[in-house]
């Protein structure tokens, strides 16, 4: 490091004395003289840290180390600006390549997906919640047994019975109707071809329960162009399947989850809107899927209660 010291008028003897002086112990030179030309101060001495040589430079103090630091700072700022100038457009380009195609798809279909919840398919935005009421009806009823399984209903006096092979339909004189789908014809909630898509995790591919849960738990708000490509494709497929399941709903249904000793499943119910249509989806421990529909008729005054639905859920099991 060097120091630049401004000069003041003095004599040549003083200047000589300063040049002959030795540095102190801290190696910093001490200056005891100044230069004079024509009787006027015109110069300064530049002293090296480890030497006593001096040169005339100017009549102003110049801090060379400060200039070097300023130059380094300017170089760093320039490098940072260049980095930002080239990196930011590159990031935008990569994001456009990755999210561009699905953003176009989202923009094209957004009006069809992000529709009000009370427009068809009604129930797109509904998600499962635990069934809070567990009390079952204790009314005298009837035991129904079909396709190797049995369950109880709190109504008596059957009116008619239809066996279509793929399902059984039983109506009661009190106005209620039961439809039990033959489990042998029950397909997977997600077709095998769709489930093989890499967008689905193995548990969804292998489990009917997980497939059905994934379908009814998906909502339009989960579909975003900024998801990963797999996530974007998965949500779109699940929404399409859910739309097919709910396309004939007259109201926005409630979805309840339940679990018994041997079964777990979901209840899709319109009772809170006075729509007397309830569908039960039960899955046993070996992942067999059972579907029962329970129907009433509000126009005729035939209404179903949750306790009557619970009677069916809690009594369902293999036939003896």
Image: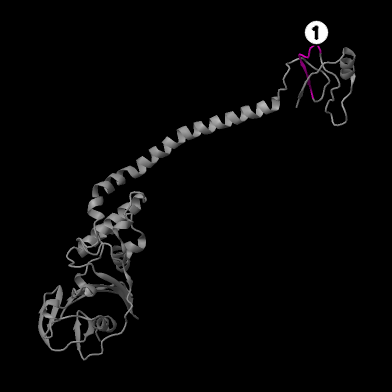
| Residue drawn where x is 20% and y is 84% of the image | 145
Q: Is residue 17 above or below residue 199?
A: above
Q: Quadrant of residue 300?
A: bottom left
In the picture, the quarter occupied by the C terminus is bottom left
Q: Report the front residue among 32 and 185.
A: 32
Residue 132 picture location, percent across and down? 33, 78
Left of 55 or right of it: where is 234? left
Instruction: Give residue 230's position: percent from left, percent from top.
Output: 34, 52
Q: Main secondary structure of the magenta part?
A: loop
Which residues lie in the magenta part?
A: 36-48
Crowding at mark 1 (Cα within 10 Å: few <14, some 14-19, many 20+): few
User: Can the viewer see residue 196 in this picture?
Assistant: no
The residue identified by callout 1 is 38
For the residue pair 12 and 308, the one nearer the viewer reads as: 12
Residue 14 placed where, x, y %? Answer: 89, 16
In the depicted structure, whether residue 289 falls above or below residue 71: below
Q: Is residue 41 magenta?
A: yes
């Amino acid at each position: 490091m060097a120091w630049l010291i401004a000069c003041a008028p003095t004599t040549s003897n003083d200047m000589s004395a300063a040049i002959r002086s030795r540095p102190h112990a801290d190696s910093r030179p001490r200056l005891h003289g100044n230069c004079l030309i024509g009787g006027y101060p015109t110069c300064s001495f530049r002293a090296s840290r480890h030497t006593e040589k001096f040169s005339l430079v100017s009549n102003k103090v110049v801090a060379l180390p400060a200039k070097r630091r300023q130059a380094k700072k300017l170089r760093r700022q320039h490098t940072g600006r260049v980095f930002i100038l080239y990196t930011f457009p590159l990031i935008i380009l990569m994001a456009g390549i990755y999210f561009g195609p699905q953003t176009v798809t989202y923009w094209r279909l957004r009006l069809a997906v992000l529709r009000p919840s009370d427009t068809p398919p009604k129930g797109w935005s509904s998600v499962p919640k635990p069934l809070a009421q567990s009390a079952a009806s204790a009314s005298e009823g009837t035991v129904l047994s079909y396709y190797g399984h049995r369950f109880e209903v709190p109504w008596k006096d059957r009116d008619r019975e239809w066996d279509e092979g793929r399902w059984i339909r039983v109506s009661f004189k009190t106005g209620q109707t039961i439809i039990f789908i033959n489990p042998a014809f029950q397909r997977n909630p997600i077709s095998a071809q769709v489930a093989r898509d890499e967008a689905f995790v193995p548990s969804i591919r292998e489990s009917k329960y997980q497939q059905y849960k994934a379908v009814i738990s998906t909502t339009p708000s989960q579909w975003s162009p900024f998801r990963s490509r797999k996530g974007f494709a998965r949500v779109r497929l699940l929404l399409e399947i859910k739309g097919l399941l709910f396309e004939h709903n007259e109201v926005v249904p409630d979805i309840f989850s339940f679990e018994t000793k041997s079964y777990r499943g979901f209840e899709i119910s319109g009772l809170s809107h006075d729509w007397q249509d309830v569908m039960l989806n039960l899955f046993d421990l070996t992942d067999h899927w059972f579907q029962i529909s329970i129907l009433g008729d509000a126009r005729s005054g035939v209404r179903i209660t949750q306790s009557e639905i619970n009677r069916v859920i809690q009594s369902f099991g293999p036939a003896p």
